[in-house]
Structures are given as C-alpha cells and as structure tokens.
Amino acid sequence: MSTATTELDLLAEALRKTMTDHTGAALDAALDGMDWRDMLTELPYETVPLVFRLLGETGAHASVLNDVVLHEAGRPLGGSVPLPYAGGSQVVWERGTDLTPADALDQELPWRLTPTGTDAPPLAAGRRALAWWLTGTARAMLALARQHAVHRAQFGRPIASFQAVRHRLAETLIAIEGAEAALTVADDDHGDLSSLLAKAAAGRAALAAARHCQQVLGGIGFTAEHALHRHVRRAYALDGLLGSARELTREAGARIRSEGRATRIAQL
C-alpha cells in the first residue's frame, strides 16, 4: 500500500469520526481545524470526493460547498456565495449557523432564499462535489435497507430472500455505481458537461435509492425514530441544488441539440 493511500485512509477515518460527532456549524469549525481549505486548494481531486461522500454516508452537513464553488471561481475562501436552486430560485448556504426555516425541505440545512442574480459563478466543481454527497447519501440509505432486509423476518424467513426485495436493492446498487462511474470521468479536462451529467446521474441514483429503500423498510422508514427519513429529505434537498436531475438532463439535451454533436466523455 502506497504512502498516499495510507494517508488518505487515515484522513477518511478522522473525517468519519468528526462527522459522526459533529454537524452544522460545529462541523464547519471542526473542518477548519483540520485545515479543510488547505486540503481543497492543494489536493482537490482527492479530498473533495472523500469529504462530500462521507457527508452523505454519515448524514452530517457543513457549508463547505461554498469553498468548492469559490475556489473554482478563483475567489477567496471562507465566505458564502449565492447558489442556483431548482425552479429558477437561488439560495445562500449560511456559515456558522444552524438556523433554517421550519418549513424547509431539510430542516437541518441553514439555507435562505435570496433574490436571483445574474453573475453566476462556475458550477462544475460544485456539481461534482454535490454528486459525491448524493452518492454517499444513497449508499447510506442502501445500507439501512439492506440491514433491515437481513434482520426482518416474514413467513419464517428474512425478507432479504424475497425476490421483490432483492430486486429493489439491486436496482439501487446499480444506480449508485452508475453515478459513481460517471463521476470518475467527470473533471475539468472533459468540460462542464461531464460534471453536469454526473450531478444528474447522482441525483437520479439518490432519488431511486430513496424510493426503493423506503419500499424495503415499509412503515418504519417514515418514522422519526429511524434514520432513513433524514437521508431521504437530504437527497431531495441536494438534488435541487445547482440544478435538479431533471433540469440538468434537459439542459444537457438542449446543449447537444444546439451543438449538433455529443462530446466524448469516456473511452469505452
């Protein structure tokens, strides 16, 4: 095992523990203490997938998407930037606060609506970061559904042995791995279309995971006592940020039609 791989494994372990113990403003402060901004500027292709995937898997949240967008725009880190949201609206992800409207889609995320501006920052890196977050969230839902299926028994045997349950879990896994495959080839060298498509694929995978895993868990998945409902809310909220899967798919199609060709993104 290489030294770089070992260091990333140690970082992943430290980040997972930090995100398990902290969220929101407390996690913002903890990540600052771990030199998150230095990691972003020096090793973005290693640390961004790691940090955002773990945010999804642990269910924690932090305002670090601001830094990813600001870094791509060449602007100073540490502030907040207006971010487009589905339906033509715009939100600001507040830093250092845990306050959010009571009627928000995800009651934990400190977002506020802001008037739509015309000076939109580049969004490719932010979309890739959100895509990793969405796939991490989808994997968290899949893990919860799988655990329930293995331990829940009906008619004298685990429901994981039922074909309908196995199919839903398999379809969820396929959607997640497809989105992750799109993410592995999405980078600045392939233009922002690859990042747009990766975000769309990740959004579709997370929404598919929410649908299938809710079916596997049944009524218990709706309860406040079970963790699934938090991941479901998070998936729907993050899907809309920087463009929903539906909007981005339409945008990609319109771009291909206008250019009369489809850019090759991956060598198959």
Image (cartoon, rainbow, N blue to C red):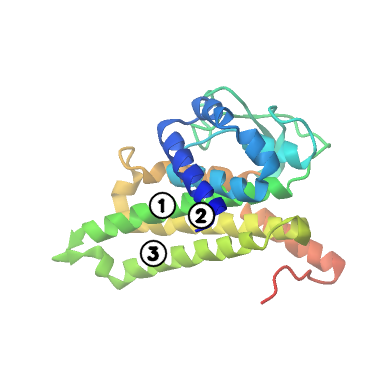
> Who's the residue at 71% across and 60% down the image?
194
Q: Is 89 situated above or below 29?
A: below
Does label 3 or label 1 sit earlier along the sequence?
Answer: 1
Q: Which residue is mark 1?
A: 141
Vertical side of 102 occupied by 179: above or below: below
Q: Are marks 1 and 2 in contact (CB under 8 Å)?
A: yes
Q: Are marks 3 and 1 in contact (CB under 8 Å)?
A: no
Mark 1 nearby-residue class (10 Å; few <14, some 14–19, many ≥20): many
Measure how far apart labels 3 and 1 are at the Cα level.
10 Å
Mark 2 surroundings within 10 Å by alpha-carbon count, few (fewer than 14), some (14 through 19), many (20 or more): many
Q: Secondary structure at mark 2?
A: helix
Q: Position of residue 112 (x, y in %)?
A: 63, 28
Does residue 109 show up?
yes
Residue lying at the far right in this picture: please name it: 259
Q: Which mark is residue 206?
A: 2
Occupied quadrant, residue 43: top right
Which residue is at 49% across, 31% downward? 108
Q: Is 250 on the left or on the right of 8, as rendered?
A: right
User: Can you give x and y, in whole percent of width and height, for residue 170 in the image?
Assistant: 41, 68
From mark 1 to mark 2, how far is it between C-alphas? 9 Å
**Residue at left offset 30%, top offset 49%:** 219
Q: Which mark is residue 169?
A: 3
Identified by mark 3, the residue type is Leu
